[in-house]
Image: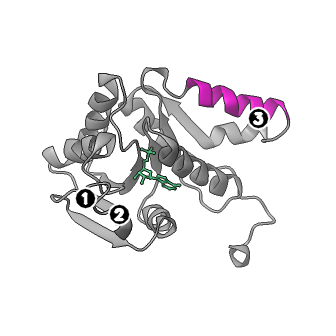
Amino acid sequence: MNNITVFCGSSLGTDAQFEENASLLGATLAKHKIGLVYGGADIGLMGAVANGALKQGGNVIGVLPKFLKTKEIAHTNLTELIIVDSMHERKMKMNDLCDGVISLPGGLGTLEEFFEMMTWAQLGLHQKPIGLLNIGGYYDALITMLKTMADKGFMKASDHDLVLVSDNVDELLHKMQNYVAPPAIKWITDDTI
Ligand code: AMP
């Protein structure tokens, strides 16, 4: 993997281990010479993951929509900051630039980004690994919800395998490196996209 996109909170959350692990993830990506792609802000866990990578000499690309430039306080020290016109363009760009995604703890924006990647994977629109760094059990309820969706017939049980979960950065990266996407659903073709 050359680049990994990280989705995470624009807040720090209430537990110090969220920030510690965000910083550790950034540093670990840099050590493995994997570029970090993220939302481009210098606040919350977004700032922590970027600064963790930068401190280790990592390559960091931020993708920030124009209208969020002041609200999310653009990081001024990145390898590259790409300014886009809309949230949709931001997500497309972050997807185009990466070979896999990781969600750290976050709020509505993080979950929106995570679920978009999951739904695109479910439709066979991409074959990239999707990791969930389940720090301190933050995502336990979401994992339970995915199981409920499958149990109640709203998601294929096999689609559980689209998400790779660990509470440990190295283990999660290892799972992502070894990920083999399920065969694409036949009724999706390039013309459909
Ligand atoms: P949050 O997890 O809510 O702190 O947001 C994390 C990141 O997701 C921030 O960069 C937000 O700008 C972004 N975000 C917020 N709402 C959305 C949305 N509806 N779609 C995509 N990204 C969003």
The answer to if 167 sits in the magenta stretch is no
Which residue in the protein does label 3 denote?
Answer: 149
Which residue in the protein does label 1 denote?
Answer: 74
Cα distance between the residues tagged 3 and 2: 33 Å
85 and 52: which one is in front? 85
Left or right, residue 64 beside residue 192: left
Which residue in the protein does label 2 denote?
Answer: 64
Which region shows up in magenta?
Answer: 140-152
Q: Could you say where residue 2 lies in the image, as x and y percent from the top left?
A: 35, 57
- Among numbered discs 1 and 2, the one appearing first in the sequence: 2
Amino acid identity at mark 2: Leu
Amino acid identity at mark 1: Ala
Q: Are the residues flagged by discs 3 and 1 in contact, CB closer than 8 Å?
A: no
Q: Are the residues flagged by discs 3 and 2 in contact, CB closer than 8 Å?
A: no
- Neighbour class for label 2 at 10 Å: few (<14), some, many (≥20)? many
Q: How many marks?
A: 3
Residue 109, compared with residue 142, is above or below; it is below
- Asked whether mark 2 and ligand 1 are closer than 8 Å, the reply comes as yes
